[in-house]
Image (cartoon, grey):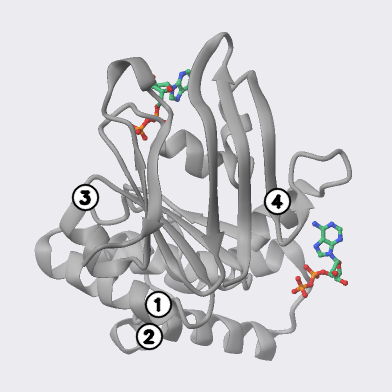
Amino acid sequence: LIPALRVKDLAFYYGSQKAIESVSMDIYQGQVTAIIGPSGCGKSTFLKALNRISELEGVVRVEGQVEFFGQDIYSRQVNLNRLRRQIGMVFQKPNPFPSSIYDNVAYGVRVFSRPNRVSLDETVESALRSAALWNEVKDNLSKSALGLSGGQQQRLCIARALAVKPKILLMDEPCSALDPIATMKIEELIDSLRHELTIAIVTHNMQQASRVSQYTAFFSTDESRIGQLVEFGATTQ
Ligand code: ADP
Ligand code: ADP
């Protein structure tokens, strides 16, 4: 097993408030790691610390290390745009842009490179196929993303993240806003994506963790140990 991300003694503060304390764990390449714990225990903060998105939310302080294939992501040399491209993210509430399906998926590619039309078309199709959405939208690529169902919107957001070819996909409760059928589709998708990239998924649902993950990290339910990891290891099925 190769660690795609290696977290060493991580602590995270919003101002003076501590949200994460002494967390150490690995996120292994090609595996799905579930991050479980009660509301407010620091799961989202932890996930967003892994691609430094949490810093966009205000003044924060970070101690310890996060290594992405051996490189410290909190070192000065890190290019944040590159980092956030390589470590993509999907949120609880699907958040497509109010633009066409095609433009949603093409967005990141257009920001990061100057693709020609043919290669962009290929990238969009390939990302939509990987997100198990191509067959449902291929005749409607120029229609608004906001016309899609919730589950389709979430798979579109996954396609948008995949289009820039990340090495890791972080998912923050990606099914919480979805119905059971849409949830099942996302869970199947997670299982197929793990052969292309590494996934970390925050969930409060133990059954979901055991269905989709190979490794599980549990944050403490104890008020006095908020933001601490109590257990990390292979998922028990
Ligand atoms: P979870 O995802 O497990 O529900 P969070 O990571 O969202 O937990 O929150 C952990 C703690 O950090 C909570 O006490 C929360 O109130 C606090 N917190 C989260 N985001 C912010 C923020 N942007 N500014 C200040 N405090 C925050
Ligand atoms: P790739 O799709 O292979 O990751 P990139 O365009 O991201 O290609 O990287 C281009 C070059 O930058 C590569 O040679 C890679 O080794 C190097 N590189 C990758 N990540 C970083 C980083 N975080 N900081 C600096 N250089 C990097």
Is ligand 2 less than 8 Å from the beta carbon at label 2?
no
Q: Nearer the viewer, mark 4 or mark 2?
A: 4
* Disc 4 crowd, CA 10 A, few/some/many (<14, 14-19, 20+): some
Instruction: Say if 73 sits above or below 127 in the image.
Output: above
Is ligand 2 less than 8 Å from the beta carbon at label 4?
no
Q: Which mark is residue 93?
A: none
* Disc 2 crowd, CA 10 A, few/some/many (<14, 14-19, 20+): many
| SS class, disc 2 | helix
Question: Pointer 3: what residue?
Answer: 177
The residue lying toward the viewer, choosing from 62 and 119, is 62
Going by the numbered disc 1, the residue's amino acid type is: Ala
**Which mark sits nearer the N-terminus, 4 or 2?**
4
Q: Real-space Cα distance between discs 4 and 1? A: 27 Å
**Which mark sits nearer the N-terminus, 3 or 1?**
1
Question: Pointer 1: what residue?
Answer: 131
Q: Can residue 149 be seen from the camera position used here?
A: no
Question: Pointer 2: what residue?
Answer: 134
Instruction: Say if 56 sits above or below 145 in the image.
Output: above
Find residue 167 and report its image quarter. bottom right
Going by the numbered disc 4, the residue's amino acid type is: Glu
Going by the numbered disc 3, the residue's amino acid type is: Ala
Question: Pointer 4: what residue?
Answer: 67
Q: Real-space Cα distance between discs 2 and 1? A: 8 Å
Q: Which image quadrant: the C terminus?
A: bottom left
Query: Does the CB distance between marks 2 and 3 fall below 8 Å?
Result: no
